[in-house]
Image (cartoon, coloured by chain):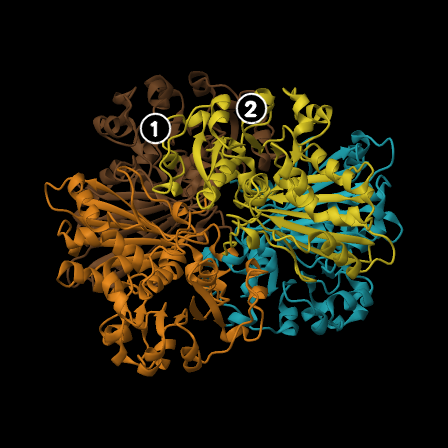
Chain colours: A cyan, B brown, C orange, D yellow
Amino acid sequence: MIKAGIIGATGYAGAELVRILMRHPEAEVKWLVSKSYVGERFSSIYGNMFRIIDEDCLGEDLPQLAEEADVIFTATPQGYLSQLLTEEILEKTRMIDLSADYRLSDVSVYEQWYKLQHGSPQLIKKAVYGLCELHREAVKKTRLVANPGCYTTCSILSVYPLVAEGLINPATIVIDAKSGTSGAGRGAKTANLFCEVNENIKAYGVATHRHTPEIEEQLSLAANEPVTVSFTPHLVPMNRGILVTAYASVMDELTEEDIRIAYEKYYKDEYFIRLLPAGVCPETKWVEGSNFVDIGFVLDMRTGRVIIMGALDNLVKGAAGQAVQNMNLLFGLDEKTGLELVPVFP
Amino acid sequence: MIKAGIIGATGYAGAELVRILMRHPEAEVKWLVSKSYVGERFSSIYGNMFRIIDEDCLGEDLPQLAEEADVIFTATPQGYLSQLLTEEILEKTRMIDLSADYRLSDVSVYEQWYKLQHGSPQLIKKAVYGLCELHREAVKKTRLVANPGCYTTCSILSVYPLVAEGLINPATIVIDAKSGTSGAGRGAKTANLFCEVNENIKAYGVATHRHTPEIEEQLSLAANEPVTVSFTPHLVPMNRGILVTAYASVMDELTEEDIRIAYEKYYKDEYFIRLLPAGVCPETKWVEGSNFVDIGFVLDMRTGRVIIMGALDNLVKGAAGQAVQNMNLLFGLDEKTGLELVPVFP
Amino acid sequence: MIKAGIIGATGYAGAELVRILMRHPEAEVKWLVSKSYVGERFSSIYGNMFRIIDEDCLGEDLPQLAEEADVIFTATPQGYLSQLLTEEILEKTRMIDLSADYRLSDVSVYEQWYKLQHGSPQLIKKAVYGLCELHREAVKKTRLVANPGCYTTCSILSVYPLVAEGLINPATIVIDAKSGTSGAGRGAKTANLFCEVNENIKAYGVATHRHTPEIEEQLSLAANEPVTVSFTPHLVPMNRGILVTAYASVMDELTEEDIRIAYEKYYKDEYFIRLLPAGVCPETKWVEGSNFVDIGFVLDMRTGRVIIMGALDNLVKGAAGQAVQNMNLLFGLDEKTGLELVPVFP
Amino acid sequence: MIKAGIIGATGYAGAELVRILMRHPEAEVKWLVSKSYVGERFSSIYGNMFRIIDEDCLGEDLPQLAEEADVIFTATPQGYLSQLLTEEILEKTRMIDLSADYRLSDVSVYEQWYKLQHGSPQLIKKAVYGLCELHREAVKKTRLVANPGCYTTCSILSVYPLVAEGLINPATIVIDAKSGTSGAGRGAKTANLFCEVNENIKAYGVATHRHTPEIEEQLSLAANEPVTVSFTPHLVPMNRGILVTAYASVMDELTEEDIRIAYEKYYKDEYFIRLLPAGVCPETKWVEGSNFVDIGFVLDMRTGRVIIMGALDNLVKGAAGQAVQNMNLLFGLDEKTGLELVPVFP
């Protein structure tokens, strides 16, 4: 059994890691670290876990935890891990970081978008960007996984094949994303109160959202040239789910068949990516609670654009599920182990 | 492997059976019967099931299905099964009926509350009321399980020990129940449109709801005398979940400890019943997607009443989960097989 | 024009006062006091008010405000006003207090339920309990109105006539109440985050909710004997609305007609109380945004109980609307002035 | 008093017309026509209207109604009015049509997008497109107003000034729109059930939505050249509200100030259009229940695009409110009469 620790276990992503790992046949959660709830019973905070997990929350001690844990998940604020991580720790354990600290290869881009000084830039090159479907082989060999952001996973997977195959003009990509509210975290902020979110929709972080450079770096790799995108997130009155609607201009003469072939080239053996039948639009409810990404598209020759839609559960494929998928890769397990979750509907 | 058929597979309860059975290690869904969608791909109706189940919906033919299936679940309208079921069918297969047709021992009570003529009253005495925690041994021996209603399961389990132990006055029981909207089914009715339900709460079926006699029959068994209760259901703007708040007058001198002892007497070995710590009120979100029933209570000596609260997921323990629990009993499996579902939060 | 000040203007009840008073033909909001937002533009906090009201929030100075305002509304935490109010202030202005400080005639009951020491118990007897339909004449003559709580208004108005007429046994009253989340206020608490409330229902404050003694005091006046009730509030995933479902045992031989006559005796000339036709259950959506209370009932002779349902908008008739209704009474205006708000549906 | 009739009064837009006109000081609703509910009390369908309006629903008889009504609103399915309207009717009354029948100047475009044959193409040129802020003077002189669609109003008003002033490249316009569910109407369809919409978001009508040509026609007028746009609507789990997020490439050297000047040139005297302060993103909740359109924008020189956001209440400015605004223009009233509705929050 893989002995796992979770730092930041009482945030929504951390708690989702607990939910998934509780039923993982090859792993067990041994340490639940939560600065805010040290000494409290985890199930007193997450009542759903009553009689399922009986552990108390522990205080932070990364070096000590590294001695004992086979893998440590950090579901912590940006900047936390970069301040603490060392080569020594990485020699003792494997790290899967759900924050952004090691996602961007260029530390200056990180510092510019996150307004933080990076604490361990020398470790960035040791990290692998854990978008499993794109970097599977590299993940298998690393000890430090930079688990991608929720918006990012959905955005990149939705458009990657069309960029990589040169079917769309990368300079024209517009990504309009909609997220459930669990993506905003469990912090007690007025803006995230029920009455402020319910019956409401708004954009936020327009032109400044931190997932933008992450999307751009990966799409630039696909395009083999620098790609800049417009990315706009929106807050939707629902708990879980991200829907991405992406727009891009296509070559003349492109057909739906061409597009489908491109997607199948990259994804036809991917269990977690479901390319929907023609004319079917993804719905976030269809992936809720699961590690799937559903992708659909419409080619609109009237405007010369393709409209691509992708949906995932931000806490699963957008966070904890993908982190477990990465863990499976790190430890040589079947990638689906513990992740064959059937979406819950309704 | 148990070969299972589901009649009424495209309603919410039927689809939840599919979700649960897809991951059941000892059973497989072989037949999906849906009158409304014959010949259509199941996953075209429930997009969440895309690439998980590839079956088409079949037309109804109970006698034929009985030849082949080890167990048949009927998630059908009231009166459907009572018209079709015969001794011959029961000799060939096992039936788990999610409708009310065989739940009430007195056919006249059925006909009075349901305004239907019962098609096979002679089979009622062959049926066992499948509230597993109360009738486990009888279920193991039957071939016809009357799977309880959602409100009923929550109401009965919440108050049963206190009635059975004589700690409350059964004549004073008031049950105020609140349900998510999936309990209203998937039929296209104006009253269940998003805009009619959202941002709204109302009572309905006041003093006439059909789950009332079912609650009363079981509590009468517990009390060993006829029990009549006030039962009022309410429609809540959420997908899943039932919360029951029950009120009853208690004996003088009763203590919280007395009540806790009564609950533990009946439930301490029950995996699916979680008696919450003192002072903790159940929340439907804590059981969502799982087969748990959470129960809490407050003794209010100021008014001489105990307030009991119970929560479950109406589609799981209130329907499909309990049906699978019954299947496990019928086939001699561990009752928890395929049902160790961790509640999804948030 | 009545010059009004609001202390606590940036809470939900305070902001609702602004919304209503902005269209009141005889009053104008001149002072918006908010400790948390001094110097900030009110419309930067409540974006709905952009270009409707251009005032900045002011700091607290009750004595100074009393010099200038004709009426002051306090939508403040329990205990705030009781510490500051004096006879001198009441000589200069009229106070409508939306907190509980002057609602209970017995200061020891207040201190027991609220765990607070009352700062000005000698003023309690000067206050009138501002449930307009019951205490209209007294309100007209006072200078200090104790505006009732939201649950209280709904609970009392729903059962008052039946208690006053002796049609129900007051010892058997059980009140099960359900509230939208704006009743929990705008404070940044984890428990009120969208993801914690949405898709969830729970009871809270069971047997200890502070609105209980307020209900009991008023019903005791109606019954002319001490009345004790079971009162259980629930949190519902919607912004606005309270639904009360009340249960009580009735006399033998009572008829629906008897009950209807009792309601009409008290309410037939009340604009804001709508007694629904037989068989119609109130829905909170039908009163949203308005000052109405809708009441319906079902007589269930099978159990010997009447089930009474009442619905109101907790921010309007349950807070700001009733406060304006009281203001209208204080200043000799038609009670409906500025309050003929048509409910918003859907 | 203007005597108004509403055909299609029991749909959501029709009922919203009733709500607004009930408090309009210069108009009264005299006829409520509803094919589905002839003879039923309107308030038995819309419980919010109980004791506010006591009329029964009438059957359809447009010629007779035209004899008596000063103005007739048709909130009817596409194609209804085009089959019935004649010059004679227009001589006797004024028509405000909330359907699409007279919105498009080119009947072939109508027939292509709506898959309907137009019943009275000769009347199209008599109609004025009732987007009041753009066609105010023409509306005053017509007898037939084609009231714009909800998505359309929000989309056009959001980008019109930038197109008209040549600040954006019209060939690059992408409009990503999100709507509450009341826009889908009150018909009993499975796809609009609570459980299908709640906790879900999806795109629909991708590249084929019928509001597209309406947007294009008006923007082409602004641009003085044919404009083609990508328009994608999404269904959001909320009752009311539309948010439009529009993207377009801008000229080099453009500044925020240039954009603000353009908006102010067109809208600075418009009561119903609120241009938000820099950096503030519109939220649908801020306009709920009101006739406002809130507009904000972000200039992103990194990508060379402006991101424009517009929000309105689809039933008010997107339907009934704008229809009343048009009525006010038709009858020479102040455009704001009866429409100074303060948005309801939360």
- Residue D327, x across and y down, in percent: 56, 39
Name the residue rendered at 26%, 30% in the picture. Answer: B113
At a point 74% along the width and 35% down the height, the residue shown is D217
Against A132, residue A34 (above or below) is below
* Number of disc labels: 2
Q: Is residue D98 visible?
A: yes
Task: Specify the amino acid type for callout 2.
Answer: Ile
Describe residue C20's horizontal placement relative to residue C247 as left or right.
right
Residue A219: % across, % down: 81, 50
User: Regarding mark 1 in the picture, which secondary structure is present there?
Assistant: strand
**Residue type at numbered disc 1:** Leu
Of labels 2 and 1, the one closer to you = 2
Tags 2 and 1 on a common chain: no
Residue underneath mark 2:
D89
Characterize the local packing of mark 1: few (<14), some (14-19) or many (20 or more) Cα atoms within 10 angstroms: many
- Indicate the chain on which mark 2 is placed: D
Q: Which residue is mark 1?
A: B144
Decide which of D285, A85 is in the foreground and name it.
D285
Pick the residue in front: D309 or B140: D309
